[in-house]
Amino acid sequence: MSGTLTNGEVNTSYAFDPQSLEIKTKSVEQTLVPLVTQITTLVNFKESYLSNGKKRSEKAFRSALKIGSAVEAAIERFVVVGETIADENPDVQPEMYDACHEARLAGVSIANLNGCLTDDSGITIDKSVLIRAARQLLTSVTRVLLLADRVLVKHILRSEDKIAYSLVKLENTTNFTDFVKIFTEFGGDMVDLAHRSGDRQNDLKSEKRRGQMAVARTMLERLTMLLLTSNKTLLRHPDSECARQCRNGVFQQMRLALQLIALCVSDGVMHFDPSHFALSTGEEVLDIGMQLTVNVAIRRLTEMLEMVRMTCNIGTNTRERLISALDSLCEMTQDFTDSAYTPHHHREQILDFLEECRFELTNLLQPDVTDERLRNGSIEVSVDRLNRRLKDLRKQLQIVAMEQISEVLRTDEDQVILSSIKTCSVSGDIDGVEKFLEEFREHAEHIQEVCRLLHHISLTDALHVATGHAERNLRSLAPLTLLAGRTLCIHPSSRIARENVEVFCDTWTQCVNDLSRLAKETDAATSGCLAAEKQAYMSLPRPGKHGTTQKPTKPITLDVEDQQKMAKVGLEMKLLTSEVDAEAEKWDEYAENDIVKRAKAMSSMAYNMYLFTRGDGPLKTTHDLFTQAEFFAEQANKMYKTVREFSYEVPGSAQKNDLSAILEKIPIHCQQLQVLVKSPTVGKPATFSKVDSVIQETKNLMNEIAKLVTACFVCATKFEIEFRGSSVPRQLLADGEYTQRGSGESTLWRRTPSVRRTTQIPAVQDSANGKNNWTLAGERNFN
C-alpha cells in the first residue's frame, strides 16, 4: 500500500515482518550490537554450564547475574524513551506502545531465566527456552528502533512537504513583495531540510543511497539560487515565454530532487508514493541505480559465466540468458561506437572485441565434444577465453571514455564560451550572446555524451550514481541556460535577465567541475595505479640526499587552470609509464636486475609527476615536483651506466647500433632536465613556465627510456643474454675506459655458448717519425 503526504501527515500501513527484516541505518545497527553481545554471553554461559555438568565458579555466577540485571535495566530505560516518542508522535503511538510492552516483557523474562541459572534451586532450563526468549527480546527491541527510525523519516518527509507547499506558493505569486516574503520562509525550510537530510545521509548503510542523497542535496542547494533569479526575471518580464519556461524548468528540477530524497529516506522503512512530489519525465526511472550500463552488463554476464563454470551445465534457460546478456552488452556499447568523437581505430577495436565475444559464446553454447569429462573441460576453457575477451573489451572502453573526457577537460571550451557569453551580456552585444549560445548548445551535447561514456565505465556504486546523475543534471541544465540566454536577447537592457544568465553559467561551471572530479575518481578506480604510490622507491628524496644541494625555492601550488594546461603533456607521460611497465613485466624472471628495477622506479616517479598535473598524488607543491625531477634525472644517469655495461655484451649488429643510438641521447636529456630544475624563477608566471618545461623534458626523457628498455629486451632475447643479479660495475680508468676483467671474474650478463661475439684484433699505434700509422697487429712486418 502506498503512503502519501496529506496536509503534512504521512499515511502508511507498513507491517512489521521479522522474517524480512533489513536494517538500513548504521545507528540502529550499532544500538543493537551491545545487546546482542550481552545476550550471546548469557546463552554461552548456559551452554557451557550444561555441557560441562560442573558448577561454575562464584565469580562466573556473579558475572552472569550482573549481565542479566544490566539487560533488564537497560531495556527499561530503552522502553521509557520509546514511550516518550510514542507520546510525541500520535501516528505511531499504538504500534510503539505495543512494541515497548513486548520489549519490557522480554527483558523481564531474560532476567528471570538468568536468575534460575544462577541460583541453587536445581531447576534445569532448556537451552531452547533461553534462545527463544533472547530472540523475542531482540525482535521487540529492533521493532522499537525501527519505529523510532520511521518517525525520523516522517520528519524529513514533512520538511519536504513544507518546501513543496512553498514552491506552489512561489509558483503562483505575481507580486515581488509577496515573493520575497515567501522566499524567506522557503529559505528557512531549506535549512531545516539540509540538516535533517545530511544526518540521514551519513547514517545510511547503502553506498548507492548515500550517493543519491548527496546528489539530491547538492542540486537543491544550487537550484535555490537559480529559483531566485529565474523568478525575479519572470516577475520583471511576465510576458516572456522563455523566462516562464526557464522558471518552470527550475521548479521541475527542484521537485525531482525532493522526490529523490524521499526515495532514499523511505527505502525499506515505509511505503511512499513514487510520484508524490514530481512525475518522472520520459522513460527514465528516478532511481538511477537500476540503470543498465556497460560495466553492469559485463558484470552480469561474468556472473552467469561463473555459474556455468561451477555447474558445467548449460540448459535452455541459461542459454537464452547468456545470449540476452551479450545482446544487452552490444546494445550498451553503441554509445561508444556511434559517437562521432570516437576515433576510427578505437571503434574497430571495440567491434572486433564484440565479435570475438560472440565467437567464444558460440563455442561455449555449442561444444563439439561428446565425452562428459572432456566436455566439462571444454566448457571451462571457453568460459576462461570469454572472460578474457570481456576483460579486454572493458579495458578498451575505459581507454575510449577516458581519452574523450580528458580531451574535453583539456580544451576547457565551456569556460571560454561561458566567459564570452558573460562578456557579451555585460557589454550589450546581443549578437555575440546569440552566437555563443549556439556554440554552447553544441558543446553541451558533446559534454553530455562524454559524461554518458563515463557513466558506462563506472566501477563502484557511488561512481555509478554520481556519474549518472551528473549526466542528467547537465542534460536538464543546458536547455534552461539557453532559455535564460534567449530571455536576455529579447530584453537586452534588463539587468535582472543579465544576472540570471550569469548565475546559470556559474551553475554549469560547477557541474563541469563535478564531472572533472568524477573523471579523476573513475580514472583512479579503473587504472588501479593508486597502489603504486605506496611503493618504497616512489618516496621523495630527503634534503641533502641524491645530489639535492640547491637551496629550495619557495613552494607554489598551481591552481586548476594551470594544471589543466599541463594535462595533455601529463597524460602523454602517463602513457609512456604504462609502456615502460609493460616492457618491465617481460623481465619478471630477473626482477632484481638493475635495468628492471630502475625502469620501474623511473616509471613510478614519472607517474607521480603525471598525478601532479591533475592536482593529485604525493607531490603537492612545485618544489616537490622539481626535487622529484632532479632525482628522476639521477636515476636516468644510473640507468645509462647500467645499460652501457650491458651493451658491451651485445655482439656487433643492427640491434646494437640501435641500442647505442638511443643510449647516446640519455645524457643529453638528463643534462637538459638538470639545467631546467636548477634554473631560478621569480613569480608565478615564471614558475608555471618552468613547471611546464620540466614536465615536457621529463616526458622526452621518459620516451627515450621506453625505447631503451625495449631495445635492451630485443638484444637480450635475440642474443640470449641472461641476467645474473644486481650489477657490480667495472672500475673506470682516468680516461673513461673500463678495466678488463680477469678470466675468473663474475659478470652481470651471461650469453649462451651458441652465440659468439666476433673477436676484434687490437690495433697498434706506430709512432715512428712522429706519425700515427695504424695497422692490425697480425699484419705488422717484424723483419
Image (cartoon, rainbow, N blue to C red):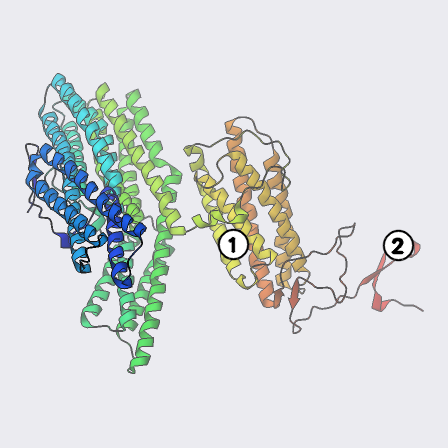
Q: Is residue 154 above or below residue 760?
A: above
Labelled disc at residue 771: 2
Q: Secondary structure at mark 1?
A: helix
Q: Position of residue 629 (x, y in %)?
A: 56, 41
Tell me if mark 1 has few (under 14), some (14-19) or many (20+) residues whose alpha carbon lies within 10 angstroms of its own: many
Between residue 554 and residue 55, name the one nearer to us.
55
Q: Position of residue 343 (x, y in %)?
A: 36, 52
Horizontal side of 13 relative to 711 (left or right) equals left
Q: Position of residue 614 (x, y in %)?
A: 43, 40
The amino acid type of the residue labelled 1 equals Val
Marks 2 and 1, Cα distance to the nearest angstrom?
Answer: 50 Å
Q: Secondary structure at mark 2?
A: loop
Which mark sits nearer the N-terminus, 2 or 1?
1
Labelled disc at residue 419: none
Quadrant the C terminus occupies = bottom right
The amino acid type of the residue labelled 2 equals Lys
The mark total stands at: 2
Horizontal side of 609 relative to 62 (left or right) equals right
Q: Is residue 707 visible?
A: yes
Labelled disc at residue 580: 1
Horizontal side of 557 relative to 639 (left or right) equals left
Between residue 54 and residue 359, name the one nearer to us.
54
Between residue 255 and residue 63, name the one nearer to us.
63
For image coordinates 33% across by 61% down, the residue present is: 390
